[in-house]
Image (tube, grey):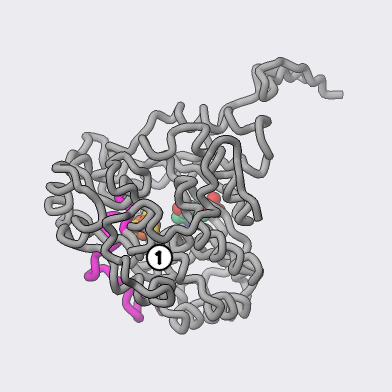
Amino acid sequence: MEITLGAAPPVSHVRSRFPYAPRSIWKGVAEDQWNDWHWQQRERVTSLEQLDHVIRLTDDERRAVIEADAQFHMGITPYYAALMDPEDPTCPVRLQSVPTMGELSFAAADLDDPLAEERDMPVPGITHRYPDRVLFYTTHNCPVYCRHCTRKRKVADPTSAAAKSQIEQSLAYIALHTEIRDVVVSGGDPLSLSDDRLDYILGRLRAIPHVEIFRLGTRNLVTLPQRITDDLVAMLKGHQPVYVNTHFNHPRECTGEAFDAARRLADGGCVIGNQMVLLKGINDDPRIVRELNHKLLMMRIRPYYIYQCDLAKGISHFRTPIEAGRRIIRSLRGHTSGMAVPYFVVDAPNGGGKIPVNPDYVVRHEGKRWVLRNFAGKEFTYDEP
Ligand SMILES: *Cc1c(COP(=O)(O)O)cnc(C)c1O
Ligand code: SF4
């Protein structure tokens, strides 16, 4: 399949292995080892010494790798690390996975639990905020620890891992509350669990009559696509309907491996959506989001949300004005496939939930007369009969 979009390089068609990392420490690794997710998981880059072999570190990064570790560990799969530009500290993959000193400067507005997820927790491991659906935390591990993570307070902290008893408590809560028809299986990354463990949890959810659908919130498609094995897909097939919400932030992440992983999931009947986080210097540019969303559609992934970067501690250097997101939506709506236009939302502090802040196309309305503006800026009047 030929993938070319405008003048952009056809990244998703390129083998991701070592495209930018001539100094890579994995040159001698055999193909089948590289494609084994257990190997990828085991060989994650977690120390300054290892990282030094992968990229040419700046002084700022060097300091941050050591000093930020106490706040939030570093962890990068070899696959994701090989997508980094070793010479360019502004590389979007690098900015998402290598600490910078920005993480250690806290803004006055920063909050420990920006979405009040702990407050809306009826039992540990469940956030129940909306009437008919819940967030269900199953693990606090992820293959790559994203520097912009909103759950920094918990993710990567082994002491806060969801114990077996907590999972049972959460399942009991869902079984008891007949209004819950949609369960977001989250974490951390639920694909950090073994197939057997996940099979068990999904089987238990499937056995609850009022649970109609569940969604897996996972970034493995981006950070460890090797995790999407035929065995995993066969297991998920037994629990359909399964929705998968993933988290691509930049077209550089749309590699051949990611493409294959998405194809396996979609062929297995999973419906895949993308939740992008708007990040300064990474994707706060309409051309980048447009290229990303076009690539995602070719991967059978539907852009679902763009999130305003929230008020979590240590991510203020990624935050953009809300207007940057609205500008991106305006640049998409009408100019390209409607399917490439997600909702832009602010997950409101203090548990307000996701609130859409999309641009408004209603200029004014008086009685039955509506004055509307189309994508090209022209005004039209609709008179209600
Ligand atoms: C995001 C979220 C959901 C799911 O919201 P949708 O708009 O249905 O995708 C459910 N519960 C919590 C607490 C959430 O943050
Ligand atoms: S995959 Fe998700 S939960 Fe894990 S570190 Fe990244 S943003 Fe946080």
Secondary structure mostly taken by the magenta-highlighted segment of the chain: loop
Residue 165 location, x and y as percent?
Answer: 34, 80
Residue 103: which quarter of the image? top left
> Going 64% across and 51% down the picture, which residue do you hit?
2
Q: Which residues are magenta?
A: 145-167
The answer to whether residue 148 shows anywhere in this view is no
Please state if 3 lies on the left or on the right of 258 as rendered: right
Please state if 352 lies on the left or on the right of 202 as rendered: left
The answer to whether 344 is drawn above or below residue 335 in the figure is below
Badge 1 is on which residue? 189
Residue 181 location, x and y as percent?
Answer: 59, 65
Q: Nearer the viewer, residue 366 or 219?
A: 219
Residue 327 location, x and y as percent?
Answer: 51, 27
> Going 52% across and 33% down the picture, which residue do you hit?
287
Residue 237: which quarter of the image? bottom right
> Going 68% across and 39% down the picture, which residue do you hit?
337
